[in-house]
Structure formats: C-alpha cells, structure tokens
Image: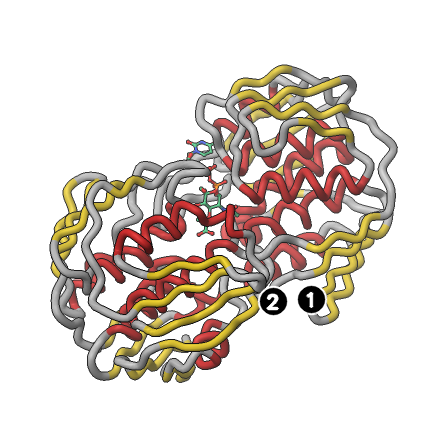
Amino acid sequence: MSSYLISGGRKLYGHLNVQGSKNAVLPIIAASLLYEGVTVIRGCPDILDVWYMVEILTSIGCDIVWKEDELRIDASEIAFEHLSRECVGKMRSSILLLGAAIGRCRHVVLDYPGGCTIGKRPVDIHLKSLEKMGVHITEQDGVICCEAEGLTGAEIFLPYPSVGATENLMMAAVMADGVTWICNAAKEPEIVDLASFLEKMGVMIFGAGTERIGILGKCHLKHTEYRVMGDRIVAGTYLLAAAGAGGEIELSGVDVQSIRSLLHICETMGCQVRITDRGIGLKSTRRLFSVKDIHTRPFPGFPTDLQPQLMAVLAGARGESEIYEHIFENRFRTAEELGRMGADIQIKNNRAVIRGVERLSGCHVFAKDLRGGASLVIAGLMAEGDTIVENSIFVERGYQDICKDLTQLGADIKVINGK
Ligand code: EPZ
C-alpha cells in the first residue's frame, strides 16, 4: 500500500482548478442507466470510486469509453444480474444503481452494502421508499432482492433527508407512471446537479435543492452530454489546508454557495476569504482562532465530509474548539491519529473538544477512511518535521491527485510505495 511523505512547515501559495465532484458524478453515472443509448459525462474525476462504478456498469453490460475527463457510457443493453458482495462491498455507493436499474430490469439483486469505518450506513430509507413505488423487496442472508412489474409515482416522506435515498428515488421516479413527490428531500448541491443532468436528459423535475422534489415519470429520454459540478469537498479540503499551513491560495471551478458554511468558519478562525472572478481566495497569515459550537448538518449546514479536515486545522488554533458530529456515528476516528502528532482532542459521544497546541509534530500515522486521510495530510502540512500517512488508497477514492494539487500550491508531499 502506498503512503504520503509530507515535509511540514511550508505555506501554500497559488491557484488551482478543482476536480469534478465525486458525490455528483457517482449518481449521474448511475442515472446513465436510465437511457437505452449513449450518455457522455464530462469533468469526471479520475478517482477510485469512479473506477469501481465503471467496473460495475461494465459487468452489467454497459460499453464504456473513458478518455481524460470524459466518460462515454452506452447502456443500450444491460442485464442486471446479482451485484456481488465483491462489487458492493468495495463501494457502498453502488446502492445508487438500484433506483435506475429497477426501472429497466424489473428484477435486481444486490448484496447488502456493508457499513464502513464512519458508520453502519443502513439503507432502510432507500428500500422502504422504493417499496412505496411498487418495488417488492425481500432481504435474506445479506442479499436484497428487488422485483417490480412496473413503478408507480407516489408521495414519499423521507424520515431523514438522506442524500443517497433522495438520489435513488429521483432515478426510480423517472421510470414510474405518474408523478413522484419526495418530501423532506436532501438539498445538497449534488442533488441539484443530478436534477440538472436528468432535466437535460428530458425529465420534468421540480424543486431540486428544496425539501420537496417532484418528478414526472415516463418522459421521453434522449442522448445527453453533461459536465458535472466542481467538487466542493475537495475545494474545502484545500482551503482548510491553506488555513492550517498558512499562505494564500485561489481555487477555481467550484460554486461559492456550495461551501458557504465552511467559508464562514474560515473567517471566524481569522482567515481572509474573498470571492474573485476566478473563484474563491483564502489568506491565512497568523495562528488561527478557535471556534466553538460547530455542528455538522445536512446542506446548507456545515458538511460532515469536511469535519475531519477542520479538526486537524483547529488542533493548531489558539484556544479550545468544539465540533459536534450529527450525521455519522463514528466519524471522529482521526482524532486518535492526530493525537499521535501532538493534538489535544477529547471525544465524548458526538462531541469533540479540541485544545489547540502551538505546533503539531510529524510522525507515522494511518489513514482509516477517505476524509480522515485528507485530514492527516493537512496535519502533516502543518506539522514540524516529516509525516508519513499510510494507506493513501483511501484518499485516492475521492481525490484525483492530492499530491500534484498540493505540490502545485507549494507543499512538499510525495507518494512513497509501502513495503
Ligand atoms: C452521501 O452519503 C455522501 N456520499 C457522503 O460522502 C456524505 O457524507 C453523506 O451523503 C452526507 O452528506 C455520496 O454522495 C457518494 P446519507 P449517503 O444517506 O448518501 C443515515 C464522502 O466522504 N441513513 O445522507 O450514504 C446514515 O446512516 C462520503 O464523500 C439511514 O439511517 O448519506 C447517515 O447516518 C462519506 N438510512 C445519515 O443517514 C438510510 O437508508 C446520512 O446518510 C440512509 C441513510
């Protein structure tokens, strides 16, 4: 397994164009199954999770050509047999295929997507909602069997604004008779991007980005070419890297409104944030202030996917900070590794208290998940001396080339191949 070797203490300067969004492109790739022909997706990031999705679509009969950032998917002929544990276990986002596939294949079987290090990640909301559209679902020995003679539009209230369940329902609704209303829907920018893609495909869809989304089923679908949105979590990661390491950077290719909550926190920490005609600028020239009472929330609240990265930055701030994690039950694991670098972080239930220290010290740490790995990279940039972050594969699931990007901004970071 490869690792990152980071020589800390260097400030970040320069401009970077942000990659396409992992959490927008995955549901849009799944939605390409809705059209019995060719779909072209541009701005597709070269990340492991997209490779896994391409592997799965190829295994069910899609013909895919991936050239640079352009993905050409021919879904004319698909046979959605049993989606194996091997596939589903590798990437739990494969559950997103269910909504699109059940509209075309009538019979879909997939292994139960397991949890991951950040939480159990159940799919009960996905399944109960699809049942309201006429899908007959049985679960046995870890396998989910879905049968549907036809899908019927329904008014569905989500008990929690689940991003994935909202996306699955949007896709299933495209193939349903009548109108589907999704109430208490997720409002993330990635939902709006999926809706824009579906609209371009010919779907009549209303209210994306609000808590109530309406979709008219059985519209005539057509060949679509679409460019996905910039990755707001990658952008937020790099802004936090500059906040923690110091310096002045500018990012293009990301919608400012998609990370407003983070920009507010950066200003509270003492960074200067400016909106330029190229994108978002951040300047960090002194030791940051602590921040109390940070809560991760569904959009437009502070995103859970930036929580570990913010924790690393606050580990070096002046004073005591507080983060509450409300989305996932086990997303504070990086605190342990940050502690080995000298951070003073106390965890109690879903609350983390971070007492800032003057300086973190480089050492040998282990990434355990995607955003936790990114958090350790930021800590390495901030620390005195060298840091090795093991298991870079976790980071490569969501970051196209974090080494190249951070090197372009002046960091001293390289990939070293493990034993
Ligand atoms: C999406 O995951 C993102 N992944 C996650 O990003 C992100 O953290 C999450 O939304 C929240 O914003 C992709 O888009 C591929 P949820 P998803 O359904 O859809 C519970 C990253 O780092 N829940 O909104 O799985 C669930 O356990 C990843 O890029 C149920 O209880 O998130 C969790 O506590 C990590 N039952 C909460 O809802 C369900 O049926 C949020 O889950 C579904 C979810």
- Does dot 2 land on a helix, a strand or a loop? loop
Image position of 114 (left or right of 381): right
Image position of 412 (left or right of 358): right
| Residue displayed at 17% across by 75% down | 361
Cβ–Cβ under 8 Å for marks 2 and 1: yes
The answer to whether residue 105 of the structure is visible from this angle is yes
Where is residue 200, by image quadrant? top right
Identified by mark 1, the residue type is: Asp
296 or 281, which lies in front? 281
Residue bearing mark 2: 46
Coordinates of residue 157 in the picture (x, y in percent)? 53, 18
N-terminal-most mark, 2 or 1: 2
Residue bearing mark 1: 69
116 or 412, which lies in front? 412
Where is residue 111, by image quadrant? top right
Q: Quadrant of ligand 1?
A: top left
| Residue displayed at 41% across by 82% down | 410
Image position of 192 (left or right of 336): right
